[in-house]
Image (cartoon, grey):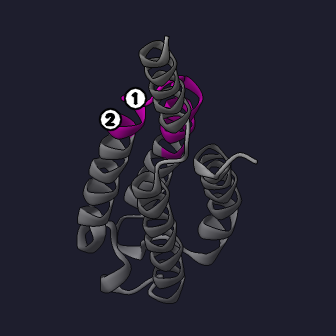
Amino acid sequence: MQRALVFLTLIGCGGAMQNWPDPVLDQRVTELDGRVEGFLDAMERSAGQASGSYKANWQFYSQVMGELEGLRHRASLRPRATEMVTAIGAVHEQVENLRKAHESGAESGLNRVVTMQMRPFLREKIETLYRKTAPRN
């Protein structure tokens, strides 16, 4: 009887721990948020300059897309991860929209108007992702 209680306790604790927030995922989302915000600020400042062109910044998109794929993979391994995976996919989609806008700007890059239009959509999707990684009380 005592062994059965210990076993059930361990199973119960293990199940509860699986639903706890993932601090690594939370940290990586925070870092990604900072990178995206910093990039948008830099693109506003360098609009119309060679340093702000898509050609000079394509690697940002490649890196962020890779980071998002890593986040999606990590999140997919968690129990009941569908909402988080969907939220990561939504951020991925907005970054791809930003990439397309940047690429269409050619040498002039992303101007302030474009970044002001794109920022709220990215912010909304990243905030949704924060809510999915936040501790639940």
* Displayed quadrant of residue 64: bottom left
In the rendered image, is residue 41 in sight? yes
In the depicted view, which residue is nearer to us: 17 or 114?
A: 17
Quarter of image, res 60: bottom left
Residue 81 x %, y %: 51, 27
18 and 93: which is toward the camera = 18
- Specify few, some or many for label 1: CA neighbours under 10 Å numbering under 14, 14-19, or 20 or more: some
CB atoms of marks 2 and 1 within 8 Å: yes
The picture places residue 61, in percent across and down from the top left corner, at 32, 58
Identify the residue at image location x=30%, y=84%. 50
Whether residue 19 is in magenta: the answer is no
State the residue position of label 2: 73
- Report whether 55 appears left or right of 3: left
> Which residue is at 54% across, 47% downward?
21
Q: Looking at the image, is 25 positioned above or below residue 58?
A: above
Q: Look at the picture and state if 80 lies above or below 108.
A: above
Which disc number belongs to residue 76? 1
Q: Is residue 52 left or right of residue 13?
A: left
Q: Residue at x 70, y 46 (%)?
A: 136
**Horizontal and vertical percent position of residue 86:** 54, 30
Q: How many neighbours does mark 2 have within 10 angstroms: few (below 14), some (14-19), or many (20 or more)?
A: few
Visible in this render: residue 104? no
Amino acid type at circle 2 is His
**Magenta span of residues:** 72-91
Secondary structure at badge 2 equals helix
Find out whether residue 79 is within the magenta segment.
yes
